């Protein structure tokens, strides 16, 4: 997470999350970041495996690398749970949050944005519950959402995502 709390590095990461990028294209998109600093950010994101090299091509005697999100970092959710792999679990969460953030970013840049009319929202609802109460509530939410999952796209039906984040217990 420390890599994404750096504002410049977070910008680099989110640009790569939108589409594969080269250092050249990143420097054009983010002109406020100098070339040496860009290379440091890329190296840091590679070292922590948030991004990976997805392509290489020869450009005037130099190898130009393309970078993409490292979705292979945590392909096996069951293994992560069974091995209680906190680092890989966090990587999954970052990928989830990145997807949600990308949707909100794209929406916020839409010239036709209408927050009230489009019915977009997010909220936090802290609660105390036993494991059983939590499971029962999640089951009820799944029952409510399940019928909508099979709906076909129509002019009246717009694609939406219902994102649920259930945090680990606090003050354990």
Image: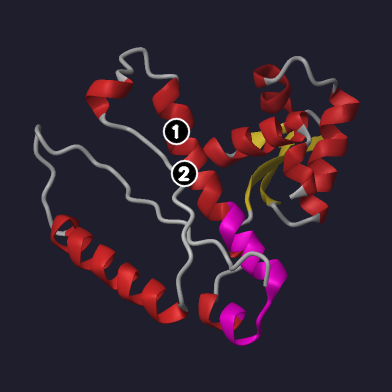
Q: Are marks 1 and 2 in contact (CB under 8 Å)?
A: yes
Image quarter of residue 33: top right
The quadrant of the rendering that contains the C terminus is bottom right
Residue 96, horizontal then vertical, whole percent: 51, 54
Q: Tag 2, which secondary structure?
A: helix
* Residue at image mark 2: 100
Label number found at residue 20: none
Of all residues shown, which one is farthest toward the top?
A: 111
Label number found at residue 104: 1
Residue 54, horizontal then vertical, whole percent: 64, 50
Q: Tag 1, which secondary structure?
A: helix
Is residue 67 one of those drawn in magenta?
no
**Closer to the camera, 127 or 55?**
127
The residue at 63%/64% (across/down) is 170
**Closer to the camera, 4 or 33?**
4
Residue 23, horizontal then vertical, whole percent: 74, 31
Above or below: residue 115 compared with residue 2: above
Give the main secondary structure, helix, strand or loop, of the magenta stretch.
Answer: helix
Q: Is residue 19 visible?
A: no
The residue at 78%/28% (across/down) is 60
**Bounds of the magenta segment:** 80-94
Q: Is residue 162 visible?
A: yes
Is residue 90 one of those drawn in magenta?
yes
The residue at 84%/45% (across/down) is 43
Left or right: 166 as drawn, with respect to 72: left
Instruction: Say few, some or many: other residues with alpha carbon within 10 Å of mark 2 (under 14 / 14 to 19 / 20 or more).
Output: some
**Closer to the camera, 12 or 27?**
12
């Amino acid at each position: 997470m420390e890599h994404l709390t750096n504002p410049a590095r977070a910008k680099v990461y989110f640009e790569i999350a939108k589409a594969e990028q080269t250092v050249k294209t990143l420097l054009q998109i983010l002109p406020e970041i100098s070339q040496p600093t860009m290379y440091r950010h890329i190296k840091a994101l590679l070292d922590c495996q948030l991004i990976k090299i997805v392509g290489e091509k020869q450009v005037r005697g130099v190898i130009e690398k393309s970078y993409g999100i490292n979705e292979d970092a945590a392909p096996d959710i069951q293994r992560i749970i069974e091995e209680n792999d906190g680092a890989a679990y966090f990587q999954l969460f970052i990928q989830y949050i990145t997807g949600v953030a990308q949707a909100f970013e794209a929406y916020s840049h839409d010239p036709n944005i209408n927050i009230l009319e489009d019915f977009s929202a997010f909220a936090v609802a802290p609660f105390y519950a036993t494991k059983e109460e939590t499971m029962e509530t999640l089951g009820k939410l799944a029952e409510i959402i399940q019928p909508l999952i099979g709906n076909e796209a129509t002019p009246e039906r717009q694609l939406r995502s219902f994102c649920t984040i259930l945090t680990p217990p606090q003050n354990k």
